[in-house]
Image (cartoon, grey):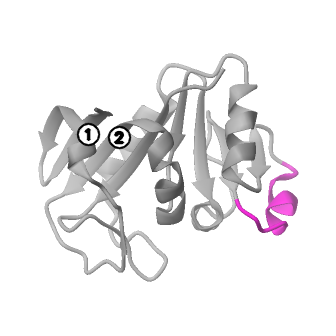
Amino acid sequence: MLRTLSIIVCLDRNNGIGKNGKIPWDNPIDLKYFRVVTTGSGHNVVIMGRKTWDSLSKRPLGSRINIILSKCRDVEEDIKTFDNVHHCRNKSDCLSLISGMVGVDNVFVIGGAEIYNEFMENCNKLYLSRLDDCFDCDVFFKFMSSQWKKISVVKKDRLSFEIWDKV
């Protein structure tokens, strides 16, 4: 059974998500939100690209099934000692793997930009954290609001948490 896919991403005012291969901000409130949403109360999956995996020091996010999507074969060596970590070489294999998983409640695409773009058409929900600041980013989240409907907004300090459903 193919499950609903969600994207979760933090953006600056210009929809920037990265600079020089890194996230250019450190926001503990957003990190906590990310952890709470992607861990939830169920059995959840996170999908990431190799660069995101590398940014995590090649260590899986706890309490979630981690899927690294990459054509790079070195990922196999990185993950062999971890439980609940999988490597898929393409989107089709990733979707097949997920559809065969039993007991999974939610699936989240967590980045980076290439992975967001690749999965956007398959996603039905967006969790957007918006920072009220600009960080001179060189990587951006491509988002066409006309294809989505905002269903909730919660503001905290200079950060807003938005949830969007596909129309």
SS of the residue at dot 2?
strand
Snapshot quadrant of residue 150: top left
- Picture residue at 16% right of the left edge, 36% below the top: 153
The answer to whether 87 appears left or right of 17 in the picture is: right
Circle 1: residue type = Trp
- Picture residue at 77% right of the left edge, 51% below the top: 87
Q: Is residue 74 magenta?
A: yes
Q: Which residues are magenta?
A: 70-81
Of residue 2 and residue 68, the one placed in the foreground of this image is: 2
Asked whether disc 1 touches disc 2, contact meaning CB atoms under 8 Å apart, the reply is yes
Within 10 angstroms of label 2, few (less than 14), some, or many (20 or more) residues? many
Q: Residue under circle 2?
A: 126
The C terminus: image quadrant: top left
Within 10 angstroms of label 1, few (less than 14), some, or many (20 or more) residues? some
Q: Which mark is drawn over residue 148? A: 1
Circle 2: residue type = Leu
- Picture residue at 87% right of the left edge, 61% below the top: 77
